[in-house]
Image (spheres, grey):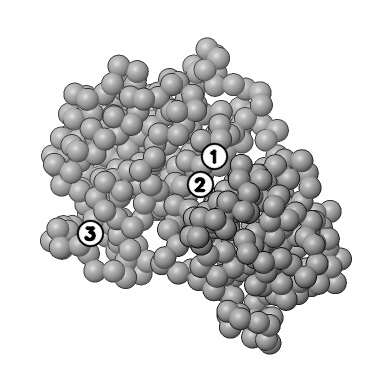
Amino acid sequence: MGNRILIVGTYDTKDDELTYLADVIRKQGGEALTMDVSVLGDPAVPTDWSKHDVAAAAGSTIAEAIASEDENLAMQMMAKGSAILASRLHHAGRFDGVLVLGGSMGTDLALDLCAALPLGVPKYIVSTVSFSPMIPVERLAADIQMILWAGGLYGLNSVCKASLSQAAGAVLGAARAVEAPARNKPLIGMTSFGKTVLRYMVSLKPALEARGFEVAVFHATGMGGRAFESLAAEGAFAAVMDFAPQEVGNHMYGSAISAGPDRMTNAGRAGIPQMVSIGCYDLIDFVGWHPLPPAFQDTPAHAHNRLLTSVVQTADQRRALAREICAKLAAAKAPVSFFLPLHGGNEWDRSGGPLADPAALADFCDEMRRNCPANVELIELDSHINDDAFATAVLAQFDAWIASGIVPTQV
């Protein structure tokens, strides 16, 4: 049973709050382990890993941090050390979940520490700036949890105890209940959207599972793409079916719904074979409750819900996107097949559909032909991405890759 929770914070200024968290965990039958990331002061009671241990993990000393006379640089050193030390400790099986407490300074450190731990390790941050726009989404670990430290800037009170006790119970419960990724079958990473607009996963997932693979489908709305890329960078996938590249266009055209500049690069860099296609390639997602940027005010759009509005790319934008995709795939260190369904990439762009633009689709296809790099096999299909012919072609290529040893059938 996962009972061991690592509690991290600055014990010189937040000893009472951190001790309270440990007491709650222990009263619930858990084991509390402690790590001090202070610089100037010391805890009332020695922690399991001291600030000197943290500094040493970063290849430095507390004396050097103090000598810098810069709290930002000092805490960045402690952030680096805590991330390295926590990773080592988890690899050694020393704890089951982590809980980090902090204001803006401690949250900055907490983001680095949580990012250093793999998917499936419960990661909780109690912060005075939880959910704040000052936290960049690219620094959020895929399965991170945050709880607002309400009324907790200085000292314990009944308001902040409500937040702290919930966090302590949440991380302990998560550590006991979590099913970490088993990795006992080769894993296929697939990108998509809901069945209203893209449907290939409905037939592909059971077909791949029947072949002995596990399939994880990632919702390509920014955070899903970040999780997909994070696992690709770890080499977690036997192959990827990156059929919904919309986040590439989102990033190119300034949308906040971005998976970052490294979208569609990590699988290739890790030597993972890739199948790629054009699911929703022609759309740019914007935050639905924000006004559309002036450049897109007169563009055809689909309001998916109150959170998300998708605008249709122009022919020129699609050509630029084709060149960007080709440039990303050109760096791949493993085989790449690009499936190009000539009749469209989402349910709304079918001939006669509300967002159909056959001329712009043809322009995109022409640009893909002109720029497709030598390492990428371009497979043109006389179909739409949601037609059965698309899934059939993908499975045929996948089976050929299995037969030739490109896709491993064992972990």
Q: Are marks 2 and 1 in contact (CB under 8 Å)?
A: yes
Residue assigned mark 1:
231
Question: Which label belongs to residue 301?
Answer: 3
The residue at the point 67 percent across, 66 percent down is 41
The residue at the point 72 percent across, 76 percent down is 16
| Horizontal arrangement in the rendering, residue 286 relative to residue 60 (left or right) | left
Q: Residues within 10 Å of mark 1 (few under 14, many from 20)?
A: some
Q: Is residue 109 visible?
A: no
- Is 382 or 312 nearer to us in this picture? 312
Q: Residues within 10 Å of mark 3 (few under 14, many from 20)?
A: some
Asked where in the image residue 27 lies, by quadrant, the reply is bottom right
- Of marks 2 and 3, which one's residue comes earlier in the chain? 2
Callout 1: helix, strand or loop? helix
Q: CA distance from mark 2 to mark 1?
A: 6 Å
- Is 95 or 351 nearer to us in this picture? 95
Q: CA distance from mark 3 to mark 1?
A: 32 Å
Q: Amino acid at mark 3?
A: Ala
The residue furthest bottom is: 158
Of discs 3 and 1, which sits in the foreground? Answer: 1
